Every structure is written in C-alpha cells, then in structure tokens.
Amino acid sequence: MARILSIDYGKRRTGLAVTDPCQIIAGSLTTVETPSLLKFLQDYVAKEPVERFVVGLPKQTNGLDSENLPRVQAFVQKLQATFPDIPVEWWDERYTSVMAHQVILNSGIGRKARQNKALVDGISATIILQGWMERRK
C-alpha cells in the first residue's frame, strides 16, 4: 500500500505527517521551509509511494476562511499540477495548533523545546492526518 501524506501549510514553515505503508498509524514526518516544500515532496514521492495528500483547510474559529486560505489554495493548484495522479483532500484544521500545544505541554518536555514552532507544525499535521483517518473508518 501507499502512504497518505498530510500537509499543514504555513507562510514560513509547513508541517508534514504520513501514515505507515499499511495506513494504520499517522506520524509526524518533518517540518519544511515553505519555499522548499514542493521540491521536498517531489523527492519524497520519488522514494515513497503516496496514495493521496490531505491538506489542512485553514478556517477561523467562526468558520470563515482564514487569511492563509488563498496561499494554501495557490499551493494546492501547484501540488495538483505537479502530481496529477495523486488526489488531494481538504481537512478542517481549526484547533489543530491548540491541540498540538496541548500535546506538547502534556508530554512534559522542557520550556525551550515547547517554543519550537516546527514541533507544533509537525504535530498539527499529524492531528490533521489522524482526524482524516478516523473519519475514513
């Protein structure tokens, strides 16, 4: 089986998470500087089969589109042009950053590590993917 890869797209950094090849477990892959994201994905897909991308849909808590949505939509257009055979699905990413911060707090890691925004992005991507997987069941 191929992996499912989730993307928590950000203006500066983007968190990525993937399933295992059997699509049972979601785990953080890495955080990439956003300008390098498409190249990173091309390299990754050349080594690992990816069945689909799940992209976080940026919404405000009131349900309105966030200011990041136009950037994410533009990226998704490039993603679909680059990988026309890999479907893209959207997943509501509201509260994923809050949940990621809570996971980090509950993990007991030190204050310095908790300030690592790349860690939050990777965990957010994992939460997006886990939510998508749970809905699929």
Image: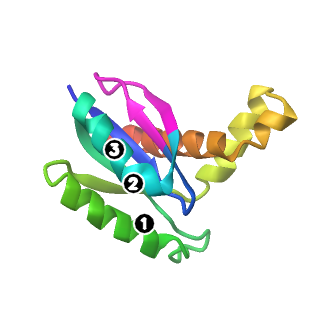
Q: At 49% from the left edge and 55% from the top edge, which residue is drawn?
A: 34
The residue that label 3 is drawn on is 41
Q: At 28% from the left edge and 57% from the top edge, which residue is drawn?
A: 79
Q: Assess disc 2: are there few (<14), some (14-19) or many (≥20) residues with their C-alpha within 10 Å of its C-alpha.
A: many
- Position of residue 93 measured from the top left corner of the image (x, y, whole percent): 51, 56
Viewer-nearest of discs 3 and 1: 3
- Position of residue 16 measured from the top left corner of the image (x, y, whole percent): 46, 42
The secondary structure that most of the magenta stretch takes on is: strand
Marks 1 and 2 in Cβ contact (< 8 Å): yes
Amino acid of disc 2: Val
Residue stretch in magenta: 16-30
- Position of residue 124 measured from the top left corner of the image (x, y, whole percent): 56, 45
Q: Is residue 97 above or below residue 111?
A: below
Q: Assess disc 3: are there few (<14), some (14-19) or many (≥20) residues with their C-alpha within 10 Å of its C-alpha.
A: some
Sequence-wise, which precedes: disc 2 or disc 3?
A: 3
Count of all numbered marks drawn on residues in the image:
3
